[in-house]
Image (cartoon, helix red, strand yellow):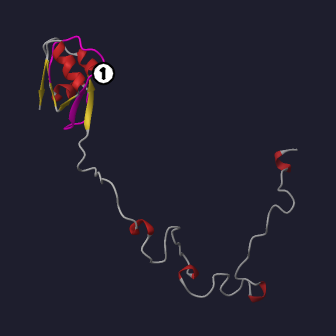
Amino acid sequence: MKLNELKPAKNATRARKRVGRGESSGWGKTCGRGHKGQKSRSGASIPAWFEGGQMPLVRRLPKRGPRRTAHTRVEYEVVNIQTLNYFDNGTTITPELLRETGIIKKKNGKIKILGEGALEKQLTVKGHRFSKSAVEKIQSTGGSIEVI
């Protein structure tokens, strides 16, 4: 068997319904669309969830749970402690310094320092949020934190 010899099995295909070819064909005049109404018009498309003007199910059901909206959520850029080993001993690390070095990207984003990894330098870190483990690790090396 070759690709050019392939054809559908017997009775597997059906002829296309040719509508609008006279009354005697059985699909003349209204062509199976019935009389009047939205579905009889050309270009009519009704979404599957449309309930004919009845109040939709989604709007009938009670709303439950918190509605968190994007404009109230504060997003922080995360910086791990091990990343701060890049800086020299005694450096004061600010969001501006992190932006200049390319560690964080957002122009006016808030920063959260996390305690992933080990810190080997004595640093003063300024940030908007700190995890408990990050505070412990910074202070254990003799550094300090400052919440902006």
Which picture quadrant has residue 91?
A: top left
- Secondary structure mainly formed by the magenta segment: loop
The answer to whether residue 127 is visible is yes
The answer to whether residue 105 is visible is no
Q: Residue at x 82, y 46 (%)?
A: 3
Q: Is residue 99 above or below residue 42?
A: above
Is 122 or 61 nearer to us in this picture? 61
Q: Is residue 98 above or below residue 67?
A: above
Which picture quadrant has residue 62?
A: bottom left
Quarter of the C terminus within the rendering: top left
Q: Residue at x 85, y 44 (%)?
A: 2
Q: Residue at x 54, y 75 (%)?
A: 43
Q: Is residue 72 above or below residue 30?
A: above
Q: Secondary structure at mark 1?
A: loop
The answer to whether residue 58 is left or right of residue 17 is left
In the rendered image, residue 147 lying in the magenta stretch gets the answer no
Quarter of the N terminus within the rendering: top right
Q: Which x, y percent locates residue 27? A: 72, 82
Amino acid type of disc 1?
A: Glu
The answer to whether residue 116 is left or right of residue 16 is left
The answer to whether residue 103 is left or right of residue 3 is left
Q: Which residue is mark 1?
A: 116
Q: Which x, y percent locates residue 49? A: 50, 67
Provide the residue span drawn in magenta: 104-125
Q: Residues within 10 Å of mark 1 (few under 14, many from 20)?
A: some
